[in-house]
Amino acid sequence: MSAYRALTEAEAIDYARQIPDLFQKDSELTSREIGDGNLNLVFHISEPSTGKSIILKQALPYAKVVGESWPLTLDRARIESEALMIQESLCPDLVPHVHAYEPELALTVMQDLSDHVIMRRGLMERNKYPLFASHIGTFLARTLFYTSDLGMNQQDKKEQVKRFINPELCKITEDLIFDDPYTDSPNNNVPPAIRDAVEAVWKDTELHLEVAILREKFLTQAQALIHGDLHTGSIFIKPDSTKVIDPEFAYYGPMGFDIGAVLANLLLNYAAQEGWSPDAASRQDYRNYLTQTIRDIWKKFDSEFRALWDEHGVDRMSKTPGYQDLYMKRLLQDTFGYAGCKIVRRVHGLAQVADINKLEDEAAKERAQRIALAIGTTLIKSHRKAESIEQMIEIAEKNVS
Ligand code: SR1
Ligand code: MG
């Protein structure tokens, strides 16, 4: 029989006490459940006398955002802890350290990042993070290159593909990102004010064709070990540090899905500036910061990925002249398409974003939703023609002027 049980705050303390070499024997510990995501419990355990603290993250056997009627595998906790360990080996400063993983409780003990803030919140407060583009560009280049057939032994990679088969979490993405938003699904949360625009999405077969192509790639292309849910709620940040968290959706999939996820969430915030910026000048200023960040992320990713390929590529055929340029162009095109899909699902799908939903001014919220939908659908429709990251910025700018 399984020993799994969802911990209470008090039980989380009991568990933390047993972790060797962490807290002092018999010292007072505090515990707070701070999880605000869609799926898990997150306990912050601290020892006031020494200032030491850790995070215990426990998977629930169902999706918290919906309730017990939506059962969900606990194996995602293993996937998350193993993905974090691989990512840490490739980018030591860019993910939290995993102290331990307890399979029976689906529990991961990890570094406390309370001195950082969730990036979505930071962007909603209109903070700027000048090092973020370089940090996330490096994270993307290193994690995607070294887990792909370009950067690792191809037989070992197939073993990794097996370890990271993640069917239940992939199914969530396949439904919530690549299906429900394009039909009148009961999973959607359609904002009444933009029902006309959403109905246009449901009828747009030209759009559906492009989504079907992107969905097929998500279903079939084991290109690299991707994070799988790399939105700004999966990033802890402070001015000098970026930490990517929560890779429970990790599996071998298309690289552009991760890159697109990051850029999409910057663009969602870009759209939401309709309501967060106090005036037109500051709106323009913050939007310029966001588009510059998009440009810098792609440039950093592109240059670092190419450098890794040139210096550490393991595949003789991948050195064929012209192949690298073609590969990078296809990655850019995937990035456009997946960014578009990630935007659209956050406007009228099941799980939306605070950047837009927390706007109090209803007219600004509606404008933000319409802008986001226009940017998202244009990115999807144009993805197979994309040639440069500047086109993404042009699409964003055209839809707010
Ligand atoms: C039922 S889970 C809803 C969403 O939350 C996660 O963060 C993923 O983005 C997923 O699609
Ligand atoms: Mg998450």
Image: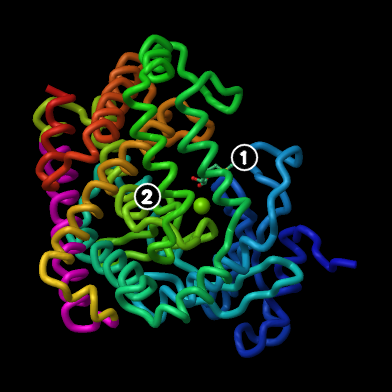
Q: Check disc 2 and report the residue beneath it.
A: 232
Q: Circles 2 and 1: CB distance less than 8 Å? A: no
* Residue 292 is a magenta residue: yes
Residue 286 shows in the view: no
Residue 378 is left or right of residue 157, and the answer is left
Mark 1 sits on what residue?
A: 65
In the drawing, does residue 246 fall left or right of residue 338?
Answer: right
Q: Residue at x 30, y 41 (%)?
A: 337
Q: Is residue 219 above or below residue 29?
A: above
> Which residue occupies 56% across, 80% down?
99
Q: Secondary structure at mark 2?
A: helix
Q: Amino acid at mark 1?
A: Val
Q: Is residue 245 magenta?
A: no
- Toward the right, the furthest residue is 1
Residue occupying the point 70% across, 87% down: 25
Which stretch is magenta? 285-314
The percent coordinates of residue 22 (x first, y second) are 60, 84
Query: Which residue is at 27% across, 24% downward?
Result: 374
Amino acid under disc 2: Thr
